[in-house]
Image: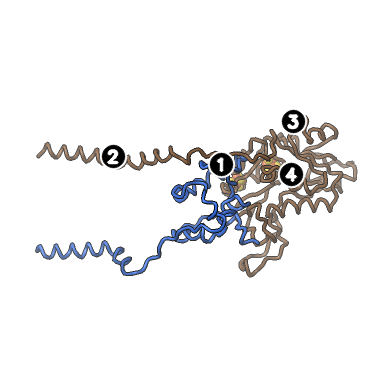
Amino acid sequence: MEQSRRRFLKVAGIAAIGLGAAPAINFAASDSHGPGAAAKVKNEAALHAERWGMVIDIKKIDDTLARKISMACHLHHNVPDFTHEVDTQLYPKTRPVNHKQEIKWIWKEKFHYAFPDKEDEFLNEKFHHLPFMVLCNHCKNAPCVQACPTQATFSREDGIVMMDYHRCIGCRFCMAACPYGSRSFNFRDPRPFIDETHPDFPTRSKGVVEKCNFCAERLAKGEQPHCVEASEGAIVVGDLEDPESDVRKLLKEHYTIRRKQSLGTEPSVYYIV
Amino acid sequence: MTKNMIMGGLAVFVLAVLSPFWFNMVTTTQAAPEPELLGPAKQAKKCVLDTYDMRTSHMSLLDEWRDAVVRDADRIYVAANGHAFNMSLSTGENSCLGCHEDKAKFCDACHTYTSVDPYCWDCHTNPKEIE
Ligand code: SF4
Ligand code: SF4
């Protein structure tokens, strides 16, 4: 009796281990045979750069053109416009808007806000009236990237500071970290405030941060960013690391400034003034 | 306790435990929907993965796609069967909805049946809906 009970317990124990291990073994096994020889590649027409940069010639921009540039970007990226009248039938529960919740990717800014460290009592008067187009600078040392706890914001290999909206938890650390105010938060569902939803780009949802993405979706197809196309030659993008690129040529020929350079974020957006 | 009482109790117990099965036998159950292949998807015949893999792991495939597109800027998926697809839910003809034009029949039918509520469409748009 004694003997057989021992044996029974032994066998039962081994069987239990076996049963417990089965799912783990299956899991490991299923992991190893993924979808065969599939590959993920870039579009052949895609534009490449070692580090993307932008040069904005402010002298070529007036108020009308500034509006056109912002519109081109915002319309194509489904950026909500809170002055848009909500279709109450489609969105019956939409509350009135607080103007501080504005969302913007590229917009016109006054010189003394865009370049507070260059403000001077005796500054040439014309600077106060020029429309400085500001946007995310796609900083080389981006503080927003370091602040993001979920890696929703990250620096891509080609220098573009991108966001994965799926991962954003809406903590807004990045907004606190960005010294340029380049980021906006979706305090509410943006959809009721989008007049015509553009099919080439998703909208965002409530609770995520958004900003300029350097038109990564356009570069991937070999197309220029929307702002460049709308700018009538005032905005140029290219490879900062390539001495032969258009942006480097412009930088060689003109005196340019960057925003809050002293902070060491190394912005990739240059202004010809 | 008599043997009869024990047997009777057991019978009641078995009946009670299997009640969901009895319930399903007397009520009509909804058959699981089959995703319907319509339009371009019907003609194409070749999808991103085999039907079985697609059914079991389209969610992890989409997860991989998202990382490839957003992080590595790789936007084309060359499937094991040699066909190239645009790694996108809804932009362009070569995307998921570009081929499977009817979202209600292709995505929603099964998701609704299995009470899954993915939040893809909170942000991604169905080109048919925004026209
Ligand atoms: S401008 Fe702001 S949001 Fe853009 S990369 Fe620099 S720190 Fe980040
Ligand atoms: S709000 Fe989103 S993107 Fe910004 S730091 Fe938090 S998780 Fe990252």
Between B11 and A255, the one nearer to me in the picture:
B11
Looking at the rendered structure, the secondary structure element under dot 4 is loop
In the picture as drawn, the residue positioned furthest to the top comes out as: A243
- Which chain did the renderer colour brown? A
- What's the amino acid at mark 2? Gly
Q: Name the subunit of mark 4.
A: A
Residue placed under numbered mark 4 in the picture: A224
Name the residue at 79% across, 46% down: A133
> Of the residues under marks 2 and 4, which one precedes in the sequence?
2
Q: Nearer the viewer, mark 1 or mark 4?
A: 1
Location of residue A83 in the rendering, given as x and y in whole percent from the top left corner: 73, 61
How far separated are the C-alphas under marks 2 and 3?
60 Å
Looking at the image, residue A246 sits to the left or right of residue A140; the answer is: right
* Colour seen for chain B: blue
Name the residue at 63% across, 51% down: B92
Looking at the rendered structure, the secondary structure element under dot 3 is loop
Q: Which mark is residue B78?
A: 1
Q: Quadrant of residue B7?
A: bottom left
- What's the amino acid at mark 4? Gln
Residue placed under numbered mark 2 in the picture: A18
Q: Name the subunit of mark 1.
A: B
